[in-house]
Image: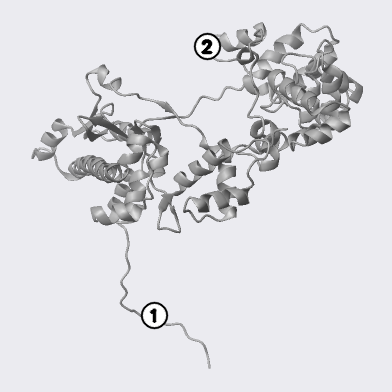
Amino acid sequence: MRPELFLSQRPELRLQLSPQLIQRIEILQLNAADLLELMENEALTNDALMAVKPPDPSLQTERPEQFEKKDAAAAEANPEDSEARAELDWWNETYRGRVRREAAGGDADPKHEAIANSPGRPRTLQEHLDEQIDVADAAPEVRELAHFLVQNLDRNGWLKEPLGELIVPFHERFTLDHADLALKLVQALDPAGVGARTPAECLALQVRDDMPLAPYLRRLIDGSLDDLARNRLPKVAKDLGITVDEVKDLAVALRRNFDPFPGRRFAYEPPMRVRPDVVVEKRDGQWEITLADDWMPRLSINPERLKLLRSKALGGDLKKHLRRDVESARFLIESIEQRRRTLERVAHEIVKRQSEYLEHGVEHLKPLKMQEIADELGIHVSTVSRALKGKYVQTPQGVQEMKAFFTGASQGTDGVVESRTGVRERVRDLVEKEDKANPLSDEEIVDRLQAMGLNVARRTVTKYRKALKIPSSRQRREY
């Protein structure tokens, strides 16, 4: 049988979004900064649209305009940062970061104070090191290579690439001996620890001969750093031939006087700023919701363009073009107003359900799903999700993403329902009150939660503990 080609028709129903509806959806999910950019761009390209800024500048200061966004996103750190955190996890998790000399009551380092108090744009690490290399007592070829090595330091101040690979482009002029001398020059610069290839080398470069504990610090860094990271203090004490209390003194000296990331104090990263889209305040015993958009320009149709459109003197393609501009401007204004109404309605429903959280804090955050808000307002759940995307709310409990009000729940044996955030706070509270000499394991935390009427799996407790940056029971143990 010979194959044949033929055409046929069949009726079919298909849901297809119009370009106008797609644009409304896009406008709905814009955050404040992106919406402002859209307004300004449309006003520049469409003569029929007028954008007038609020006449009174005080309107922009009645409410806080900018708030730092706490990152969040550490989840999107670059690979070098992730590697550094993995290698020095004990520093951040167990010991909770470096304690500054000033906080410990010691004398402040004048060089560090000069860096912190310098006006204008903070100097980069490369600029800081290049100035020192220029006046260093070294051969010109060594200084030249040192400048090159500084350009290859990562944001931690570490040199991750092997010297032999770095100097390949200069093999006709410089040898590996020149590179070694250049690296020694870099490693002798301020801040101490720059130019290190490993975390241990970074800390070792910061040990000075005049330190009372210098010999023990060097031995600790050279051979026992991993055991210290895992809180194996008795083993460290045995390896160094000292007591556990003396090991604890060494750990204190490390975190007070040593910085595993010396380059980060120079890194210039402007903090990510956000504007609250909604402000929630309690007045006369009632929660009031205000859309924080009084700083935005007010949009309107250009009356001159409307008058020209109605004029009989204009015709043909010019009139079609003008009508298209007017319709586009009107559509944008209506879409933005619809965005305001939707956001306000959703905010009202959230506040109605989370008033206890607003009053008393995170322990009183109730389980809430977007579907509940959608059902109450008679809209699709995707509309609620888009309305909340990238939006922030200013509350008595601080500024946070509006999606943070929506959380799952844990069901208890006695019918108790508690939000995930509430369970995490209970985990944090149990750890804070535990016996530090015999810290709670994740299984024991599960038992404590069950005694409170909450059924939570051990893997869930482990996940919450890690999210709270709480070390394991082994690492929390105090000797």
Q: Secondary structure at mark 1?
A: loop
Q: Quadrant of residue 354?
A: top left
| Residue occupied by mark 2 | 120
Give residue 7's mark: 1
Q: Would you call the spot at circle 2 few (<14 residues within 10 Å), some (14-19), or many (20 or more)?
A: few
Q: Nearer the viewer, residue 299 or 87?
A: 87
Give residue 86's mark: none
Q: Is residue 284 left or right of residue 449?
A: left
Q: Nearer the viewer, residue 73 or 466?
A: 466
- Contact? badges 1 and 2 (CB < 8 Å): no
Q: Would you call the spot at circle 1 few (<14 residues within 10 Å), some (14-19), or many (20 or more)?
A: few
Could you tell me residue 437's position as x and y percent?
68, 36
Q: Nearer the viewer, residue 221 or 323?
A: 221
Quadrant showing the C terminus:
top right
Residue at 75% from the left image edge and 21% from the top image edge: 193
User: Looking at the picture, which amino acid does disc 2 mark?
Assistant: Gly
Q: Is residue 222 left or right of residue 372?
A: right
Q: Secondary structure at mark 2?
A: loop
Residue at 74% from the left image edge and 20% from the top image edge: 253
Q: Earlier in the sequence, mark 1 or mark 2?
A: 1
Could you tell me residue 347's position as x and y percent?
28, 42
Q: Quadrant of residue 121?
A: top right
Q: Nearer the viewer, residue 340 or 454?
A: 454
Compared to residue 15, the image places residue 403 above or below, namely above
Could you tell me residue 97's position as x and y percent?
64, 27
